[in-house]
Amino acid sequence: MENLQVDEKKIAIRVTDLDKIYKLYDRPSDRMKEALGLTRQKRYKEHHALSKVSMTVQQGETVGIIGTNGSGKSTILKIITGVLNPTAGEVEVNGRISALLELGAGFNMEYNGIENIYLNGTMIGFSEKEIDEKMESILDFADIGDYVYQPVKTYSSGMFVRLAFAVAINIEPEILIVDEALSVGDVFFQAKCYHKFEEFKKMGKTILFVSHDLSSISKYCDRVVLLNRGVKLGEGSPKEMIDIYKRVLVGQYAVPEEDGNSLLDDRELTAAAAGKAEEGRAVSAGINPELLEYGTNAAKIAEYFITDEAGIHTTAVIKGQEFTLHMRVEFAEDVPAPIFAFTIKNIKGTEITGTNTMVEKAFLEPVRAGEKKEITFRQKMSLQGGEYLLSLGVTGYEQDTFQVYHRLYDVLNLTVISDKDTVGYYDMDTVAVVKEWRG
């Protein structure tokens, strides 16, 4: 992991040994008794949302924060913006902040759009004259027409977030803090949001960016901080941190020790992955608890998982890299010629690609009851960045009759990480050349 050289004169955000502890009570009465001093007994459990987290963001940097749900990503942003108070630690902010956290949180539902623009602008610290100067750009960005003169309680959810985003993004902050806010509205509004985001980067604004969209993290961020269960696991380049995050998703990491020692090194992690494979344990990360399953039970897909080109178990694959899909199948009956297959669909249910061992001419032999087979499909990831669903199957023909022995629909979530998406479902790896032409 890289060591950041800090210029003290150009620090935009500095977080030092930040702790956030919540008290969890079993009953509301316990909270009241403690508040009124009616008991000396400890009636709560402590939940450490953040524990000794430190990070520095330089002026003009775009820094991403990634981690699983409950890792403390949103908590640290709320502390930096002053929404929450830390239990311990220090936060230093140099510059005016615009925070895209809970869009529209300061809106009055009875006010119309114009009135809420003035209300929000005043809360941020602008004068009425300054808001007047920004009004046209806010209304153009929101693009909700005459609805801006109606009470916001009459807005659709899409119009509401469009207006809230337009207010937050057009106040020309020195520091922009974003928490999953770039996915609001329809696809055209999202494109406008990302364009504005890129403008901010070109203007040298400081951006702190939290997202589950690893493709956006990879594309926009100069540096990434990885959190897990309130602990900072490391920071470094987007690729380095995303690679480690993929291991976190499947439990192949070590929690940092008190002396600052952090993650397992690559050799240890690879050995850990190989060990898990040898032990025959299926990886549960990304598995759909509501999958559709059926078949004759002559065969059973007992285990299934994905590994990246380093052999690490994962559900996130970087575009352009090789990955392998693994299936382990147990047979309860004799099967004349089983066919092993997989299909990848997008989240709308459209089948994007897939293949099977018959098409690939890999296996067409009889299998006896009690046998076990391990099937691997290795390929290069050419799909665009995004979320996909994986389906698996064991089928075959018995006297010209098609049989489904075991089928698992939408069994695994597959995330493709990309910093370059072309048009359509997949990338043709086009090589583009531009040169002078003299006609």
Image: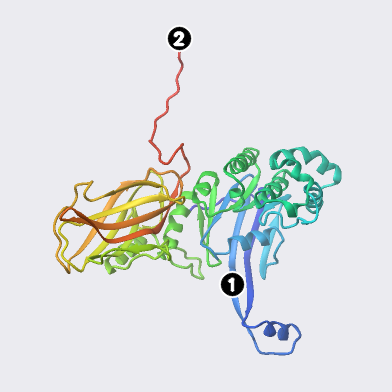
Work out whether residue 283 or residue 107 is closer to the camera in this orientation and state it.
Answer: 107
Judge depth for marks 1 and 2 and give the one in front. Answer: 2
Q: Quadrant of residue 201?
A: top right
Which residue is found at the position 33% from the left and 54% from the top? Answer: 310
Position of residue 88 measured from the top left corner of the image (x, y, whole percent):
66, 70
Q: Residue extending furthest top?
A: 439
From the image, which quarter does the C terminus lie in?
top left
Circle 1: residue type: His
Which residue is found at the position 23% from the left and 51% from the top? Answer: 357
Instruction: Please indicate whether residue 347 sits to the left or right of residue 309 in the image.
Output: right
Q: Is residue 16 above or below residue 178?
A: below
Which residue is found at the position 49% from the left and 47% from the top? Answer: 215
Q: Which residue is mark 2?
A: 439
The residue carrying pointer 1 sits among few (fewer than 14), some (14 to 19) or many (20 or more) residues within 10 Å by Cα, namely some
Work out whether residue 150 or residue 29 is closer to the camera in this orientation and state it.
Answer: 150
Disc sitting over residue 408 in the figure: none
Instruction: Please indicate whether residue 44 sits to the left or right of residue 108 in the image.
Output: left
Q: Regarding mark 1 in the picture, which secondary structure is present there?
A: strand
Position of residue 407 measured from the top left corner of the image (x, y, whole percent):
31, 60
Which residue is found at the position 76% from the left and 45% from the top? Answer: 148
Position of residue 129 measured from the top left corner of the image (x, y, whole percent):
86, 42
Instruction: Please indicate whether residue 126 sits to the left or right of residue 166 in the image.
Output: right
* Mark 1 or mark 2: whose residue is earlier in sequence: 1
Residue at mark 1 to residue at mark 2: CA–CA distance: 69 Å
Q: Which residue is mark 1?
A: 48
